[in-house]
Amino acid sequence: MEQELISKKELLELTDISYGQLYRWKRKKLIPEEWFIRKSTFTGQETFFPKEKILARIEKIKQMKDDLSLDELASMFSPNPTTISLHKDDVIKRNIVSEVALHFYMEQKGEQHVLSFEQLLQLYIFDRLLQTGEMSLGEGKSVFDVFERHYTKVQGKSCELLVVRKMGISTCLLATNGSELYFEDGAKVVARLHVPSCIEELKIKVTEGMDKWSEKI
């Protein structure tokens, strides 16, 4: 489905930011280059943005820029891997994922005391699908398997996780944005998640959890 776009002029008016701020955030990599879309209009070339993504990103930048430097924000929004890891007990205490999701992961992958960021990402995505009802508990194994087999091939790229179901049987796939996908008759995409957005959400969730934990200590 084609994404809704917003013009640069509309964006600046709606968010009450300046042209200079917008392009400074672009230079600092807080806003991805690929979101600046040049299109021909009757007045010439204009810049547009994916509306939902850019509005959400600017809102987060405005909320967090007083507490974090632009470089720290850029690291937060980066789709690249991070050195964050958490003990399994902290994953529950900080409400990163549900206890049900973590328990199922341990059943599938064996008892582990410390989880890497990539493992947390698998869990976070699985838990989101579980909470929305788009995936059953038993289907979670396909999320873990597709990440372990193929995530390194799309790491750092703009990609999506798709859950496809036919006749009650589901499968997961990772696809880079722009990939054309064709399915057999009767197959339906029941869930579609933008992986870099999930990474960003998880980093924020973990960081906020660390800040609250530090305050208590």
Image (spheres, rainbow, N blue to C red):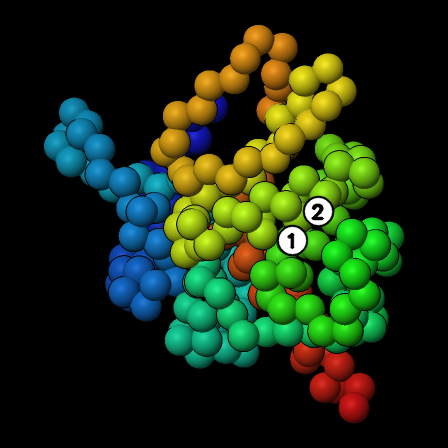
* Residue at image point 35% right, 42% down: 49
Q: Nearer the viewer, residue 38 or 102?
A: 102
Residue lying farthest to the bottom in this orientation: 217
* Residue at image point 62% right, 19% down: 188
For label 1, the residue is 122
SS type, badge 1: helix
Q: Is residue 187 above or below residue 33?
A: above
Residue 129 percent location from the top left of the image: 71, 41
* Residue at image point 69% right, 69% down: 115
Q: Are marks 2 and 1 in contact (CB under 8 Å)?
A: yes
Left or right: residue 97 compared with residue 5? right
Q: Is residue 189 above or below residue 118?
A: above
The quarter of the displayed image where residue 139 is located: top right
Residue 158 visible somewhere in the drawing? yes
SS type, badge 2: helix
For label 2, the residue is 126
Residue 132 visible somewhere in the drawing? no
Q: Is residue 82 above or below residue 57?
A: below
Quadrant containing the C terminus in the rendered view: bottom right
Looking at the image, how many numbered discs can be counted on the residues?
2
Residue lying farthest to the left in this orientation: 44
Q: Nearer the viewer, residue 145 or 37?
A: 145
**Please, what is the three-letter code of the amino acid marked with disc 2?**
Phe
Query: How far, Cα to Cα, is label 2 from label 1?
Result: 6 Å
Q: Nearer the viewer, residue 138 or 209?
A: 138
Left or right: residue 184 compared with residue 159? right
Left or right: residue 167 compared with residue 145? right
Residue 9 percent location from the top left of the image: 30, 44
* Residue at image point 65% right, 53% down: 122
